Amino acid sequence: MLFARRQLENCLKNTSHDCHPQHGAELNEWPSRILEISEKERTVKLVAFNPSSMVMHYTALSYCWGSKEELERKPNRMTTKVTHDTYMATGIPIHDLPLTIRQAVWITQYLGQRYIWVDSLCIIQDDNSDWEVEALKMATVYSMATVTIIAASSTSCHSGFRHKGTNSKTAVDFKHLNAIDQRGWTYQEEHLSTRYLKFTEDDIQWECSAGTICFCGEGAIDQMGRNSDKTRGKIGLKSWNSIVRGFSGRAFTKQLDKLPAISGLARRYAEWRQEEGTQSRYIAGCWEDRIKGLTDLVWEVEGSDRISAVVPSPMSYIAPSFAWPSVNMRVHFHDPNTNVQPLCEVVAVRVHPMSVDKPYGMVSDGELVVRGPL
């Protein structure tokens, strides 16, 4: 753990690290609540989030809740309409928290931070309106945290970090898949983070805009340059095609979460495109200009020569069939200029968001109008 604290302190103090969040946040983009850690009382208490005093003083946890079967046997600790007032008034004893969350609290304390954001406790889980509002604030929660704690090897909120430790100086493959790499929500949690600490079974990994380093090969982080395709907090350096490919094959307990689970990345990507002089409407995981240019229409299920009727679709409506979120498999795009001969042109495209003020969230329906020969 000394490795983790050293990396964070180095990043915060090193003026050569361009690791501070690149985007400001409006008041309505901050989370409504956060957990305050009381070392004296050994509790975490739900408190209202105050940007003026809490920014750069909190961590955010990225973890797997667990399988549906496991959570039915042993539920996660959650804030609900019934527990909300109690958690605000007296808090929760740290020893009563599920193991993964408890360990994240300990790490937060060790890193010298006073607050931690955990989805199950900072969002009222049985209040749909609260969930819809707070879930769309993920871009701010993770990008503005001092550091994100990723429980990569943990399979559930009860399993703990499962870190065996290593004395080996052999480099660890950063592309190796951990349990968390299969889950839908955790993709944007990692990629939105300005800094993160990832706890795998065999190692502790650090990443920030200055580079990547692991405990197995401890050294000066600013001597490393392994961040070639993504810079922390700078979404534009990663193409939308690669974002979709990395995200689309992940699993969800609730399929309806698919668009909300990429909404933070979509919003950040839209901001980056505006900075680059491109303004385009977001269309259920796609972009209007890319649809009209056919780029976002020329996709296929990975490992398949063509999309067929046997491709599994979500049990509930997620997106119109021309959009990649409508199928439950990893997809990739083709370059329409080299792989497809266009026989039509897009005349119009639209979707209806479930809420007019949430253009990056769930949609109720969509329509694509094309013109071409019959």
Image: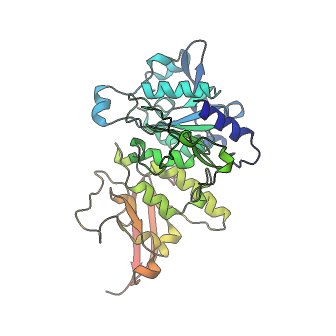
Residue found at the far bottom of this picture: 373
Along the line of sight, the residue nearer the viewer: 18 or 343: 18
Outermost residue toward the right? 15
Expressed as whole percent of the image width and height from the top left, the position of residue 251 reads: 35, 48
Q: Residue at x 41, y 83 (%)?
A: 342
Q: Is residue 24 visible?
A: no
Question: Relative to residue 223, is residue 296 depicted above or below?
Answer: below
Relative to residue 211, is residue 70 drawn left or right?
left
Image quadrant holding the C terminus, namely bottom left
Residue 156, can we see it? yes
| Residue depicted at 63% across the width and 32% down the height | 5
Q: Is residue 301 left or right of residue 165?
A: left
Image spot of residue 163 (x, y percent): 45, 32
Nearest the viewer among 189 and 370 is: 189
* Colour setup of the view: rainbow
Left or right of 265? Residue 69 is left
Please tell me whether residue 192 is drawn above or below residue 374 in the rendered image.
Answer: above
Q: Residue at (53%, 40%) from the top-left corner?
A: 216
20 left or right of 246 in image: right
**Between 228 and 99, which is closer to the camera in this rendering?**
228
Can you name the residue that lies furthest to the top here? 41
Q: Position of residue 115 (x, y in %)?
A: 61, 28
Instruction: Provide residue 23's location: percent of width, then percent of height.
Output: 67, 49
Quadrant where the image shows the N terminus: top right
Q: Quadrant of residue 370?
A: bottom left
Residue nearer the viewer, 271 or 171: 171
